[in-house]
Image (cartoon, rainbow, N blue to C red):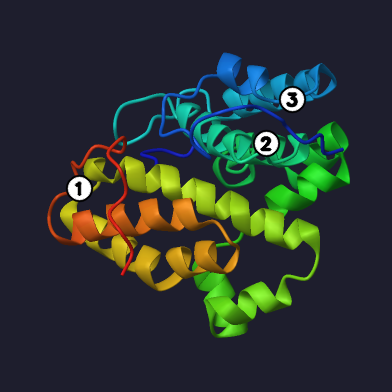
Amino acid sequence: MRTQRGPGVQASRTRTSPYARGGHTLTALLEGAGQAGCRPLIERAYEVAATCHRGQRRRSGDPYITHPVEVAGILADLDMSAAVLCAALLHDVLADSPYTAAQLRDDFGSEIAGLVEQGTSMDQYRSRYGSIAEAIDAAQADSERQALIIKLADRLHNMRTLRYLPPVKQQRKSQEVLEGFAPLARNLGMSEVEHELVSLARAALAGNSDRSPGAPPEPVR
């Protein structure tokens, strides 16, 4: 949601929830990134993303870079690899800046570049495969599944900030969640992400998109 365009180290932490609900910062992201060896790579991805999104703002008025940091933070709390965290930080740079796929590949290698380039929309998945279930079945490679997980984290943060969109867009995006993203989360075994997505979507469809993202998810029925 923007107003202008402008190898894998697993984390291991003790926490009370599978993922935090907002408030991520680069410092927290680095602290949660597991082994110190992956931190320079994540810092470099942040620096590139911050440069690419300089001057861009969210509908909320926040600097746009806060969005990829939140997306990466959600994935860090889900113990995703350093490559996935970097791809999350960079997930909008190709669409929203002059930064090219060739530069991305030169700067970060084929694994991270491939994850960013695979970040296609759910509409493309539906048109290509016919259903979310078929898309999951077709995503045999780990990288394809990781790209889908990045898309889920992207949509989750956008749903947490949905109140800044016009009501018509809130309704449309909430319907997309119920029809596509929530089933995707369920098929990937990400039940808590599914529950929060459904809860936020139902709240928006009921005209209550100001529900606090820190509130416990409503049960999925």
Number of the front mark, 3 or 2: 3
Q: Amino acid at mark 1?
A: Ser
Q: Do callouts 3 and 1 mark residues in contact (Cβ within 8 Å)?
A: no
Q: Secondary structure at mark 3?
A: loop
Q: Amino acid at mark 3?
A: Gly
Q: Secondary structure at mark 1?
A: loop
In the displayed structure, does residue 89 sit left or right of residue 210? right
User: Could you say which disc has been placed on residue 85 in the image?
Assistant: 2
Q: Secondary structure at mark 2?
A: helix
In the displayed structure, does residue 97 sit left or right of residue 209? right
Q: Residues within 10 Å of mark 3 (few under 14, many from 20)?
A: some
Looking at the figure, which quarter contains the N terminus?
top left
* Vertical relation: 158 (above or below) 197: above
Give the residue pinned by disc 3.
Answer: 34
Q: Earlier in the sequence, mark 3 or mark 1?
A: 3
Identify the residue shown where x is 78% and y is 52%: 114
Outermost residue toward the left?
207
Between marks 3 and 2, how big is the CA–CA gap?
A: 12 Å
| Residue 125 image position (x, y, % from top left) | 58, 73
Q: Residues within 10 Å of mark 2 (few under 14, many from 20)?
A: many
Q: Residues within 10 Å of mark 1 (few under 14, many from 20)?
A: many
Between marks 1 and 2, how big is the CA–CA gap?
A: 28 Å
